[in-house]
Structure formats: structure tokens, C-alpha cells
Image (cartoon, rainbow, N blue to C red):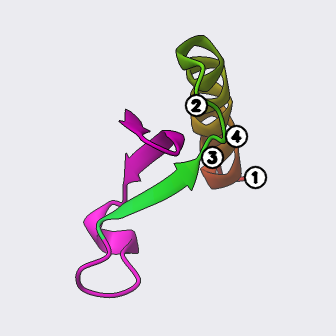
């Protein structure tokens, strides 16, 4: 999910319950370091693809 803050766009993703390292940590936030919405969409799509690649069993 894209979130717009004054500093720019951020990508937010929920952590599944079984993978939460500690109570209260429900989301991961990443700064996309851009104010351009189209560029933020591209960066966030890369984040989703990249993070799902890491979680695939090998």
C-alpha cells in the first residue's frame, strides 16, 4: 500500500501473525524516497515482487 507523507511516498506491508517478531509489530514500512506518485508505484511494485521472491521455497 502506498502512503503519502510530507517527506514523500512510503510503502507499507502487513506482517502475517506467524512471522511477527514481537507483539505490536504488525507492519513493515519502507521509504520510497520520491514525491512522484508514478515512480512510487513502480518502486512499490518492485518491493512486492522482490519480497515475494525471497519468501519462495527453493
First along the sequence among labels 2 and 4? 2
- 10 Å neighbourhood of mark 1: few (<14), some, or many (≥20)? few
Q: In this figure, which residue is indicated by the disc labeled 2?
A: 44
Q: In this figure, which residue is indicated by the disc labeled 4?
A: 50
- 10 Å neighbourhood of mark 3: few (<14), some, or many (≥20)? few
Where residue 51 is drawn, which disc sits there?
3
- In the rendered structure, which segment of residues is drawn in magenta? 1-25
Viewer-proximal residue among 8 and 32: 8
Viewer-proximal residue among 18 and 48: 48
Relative height, residue 51 to residue 20 (above, below): above
How far across and down, in percent of the image, does residue 56 sit? 64, 48
Where residue 27 is drawn, which disc sits there?
none
Identify the residue shown where x is 60% and y is 19%. 36
Circles 3 and 4: CB distance less than 8 Å? yes
First along the sequence among labels 4 and 1? 4
Q: Distance between the residues labelled 4 and 1?
A: 15 Å
Amino acid at each position: 500500500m502506498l502512503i503519502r507523507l510530507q517527506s514523500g511516498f512510503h510503502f507499507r506491508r502487513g506482517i502475517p501473525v506467524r512471522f511477527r517478531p514481537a507483539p505490536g509489530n504488525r507492519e513493515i514500512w519502507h521509504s520510497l524516497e520520491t514525491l512522484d506518485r508514478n515512480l512510487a508505484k513502480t518502486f512499490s511494485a518492485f518491493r512486492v515482487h522482490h519480497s515475494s521472491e525471497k519468501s519462495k521455497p527453493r
